[in-house]
Amino acid sequence: MNRIAGLETEYGCLTSEHAGPPGIIGRVRNWIFEKQHFGLADLHQRDWDEPAGNGGFLFNGGRVYVDMGHLEYCTPECLSLIDIYRFDRAGDAILNRALRELKIADQVGFIRNNVDHYSGATFGCHENYLVRRTAPLNEPNVLGLLSFLTLRVLYCGAGRVGSTPGAELRAAQLKENTETPFQVSQRADYINNDLFEWVQFNRAIINTRDEPLADARRFRRLHLLHGDTNVLPTSLLLKVGTTALVLDLLELDHLPKIVLEDAVSAFRNISHQPDGPWLVKLNDGRTMDAVELLAEFREQCRREFAGRDTETDTLLRIWGDVLAALATKPESLVGQVDWISKRWLFQQFVSEEKIAWNDPWLKAQDLEFHHIDPARGLGLSLEATPADWQRTPADLTAAMSQPPVNTRAAARSHLMHFLKDQSMRYYVDWEVIDAEGFNSLNLLNPFDAAPVEADAWLKQFEKM
């Protein structure tokens, strides 16, 4: 990719009918850091809701912590699209190993989903993209980006059974059809704004908080929280890869002039119409097909970036294939696009078991689709990833403990391995590392895997 990117996954937790062992989230988090299995626990309070020991950084460059009751895993800073996949799946692998080592895998499981069917709550998958300060963030470009982020749900939505009570009430007030047995997106019902700064209670398609976690003079961070957590690699890689390409267009000031009349309404309407037609209104009064609009974004990316590198060409080809299938034969994307795969599977289940779409049994199967245990996850059993994006088990295992080699995650991991053998207190964050009695080390350039300053910082300890 032409930028650093990373994902934050908040895991749902399933327990047996006997509720499983108490304090399971804390036990799994503690296992990750005890005896320095996978990283170093925080020794200092990071925020009002993040006391010491609430989480920590991993030797693979990522981070694990407890956020409002959920176990959250953050990938390290990734420059390669394939690394996004490898390090995202490393979080699953670490949690699966923790459950096995704690001997509770038969009672507890983690799931990559975004909806609690029983309480109505939602939890997210946040995306982070480094954007250069030189990017022209004028109104047409921001609205064009907003349009793309709305429409891409057609190939990166995770799918869900049913709707939230609030969404059905809003639909009833508008005299719309309130019966939506299956949706394209898990998050759509919970998105209230197109642009907003804060992430809770007033969720937006674009989060406008400016927190670069890097050199603020050169970079900003685009923080997205409207996307679903993906199970299938194709949906995951298309979500991140196509967004990175569209951000390349933005930085060149070459975004297509596509502006939706109401992005939030379009997002919800698409989600509630899995059979289509996926028609959206533009601000100039026209009604257009969402797949055709996505094809315009893809064609602009092809004109600008085809031939740039193998990863980009692969992405453009698979993106084109998926859009063509969406327009003509969506069911051919079973095994590649989450929501299409889930719906196809559940259609067979409903037919064979002769149950209704609102049957609690189906909602239980909805959760099982997202299970991270390969022996149990319904979604993983359908995987049909294009050959270019398939990884070996060794690739995925290495990502559990080894950082990307081409971003600052490598430098942070190297320094953490040094700190684990010291008796002094330390503080590790994305862009800074402190050790008691020594000067702070700033890692402000996310592209620098081996900053000269890191070597100088380590030499301080030679004089002890």
Image (cartoon, helix red, strand yellow):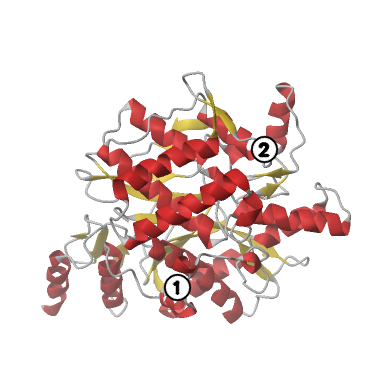
Dot in front, 1 or 2: 2
Tag 1 near tag 2, CB within 8 Å: no
Dot 2 lies on which element?
loop
302 to 79, vertically: above or below: above
Of the two numbered discs 1 and 2 on the same chain, state the one appearing first in sequence: 1
Q: Nearer the viewer, residue 3 or 257?
A: 257
Residue 181 percent coordinates (x, y): 75, 43
Instruction: Give the x, y percent position of residue 251.
Output: 27, 40
- What's the mark number on residue 33? 1
Q: Position of residue 451 (x, y in %)?
A: 17, 65
- Please tell me which residue is depicted at 56% across the width and 61% down the height of the picture: 232
The residue labelled by disc 2 is: 273
Q: Going by the image, does 288 lie left or right of 130?
A: right
Report the amino acid beneath label 2.
Gln
Q: What distance separates the C-alpha of mark 1 from that of mark 2?
A: 44 Å
Q: Quadrant of the N terminus?
A: bottom left
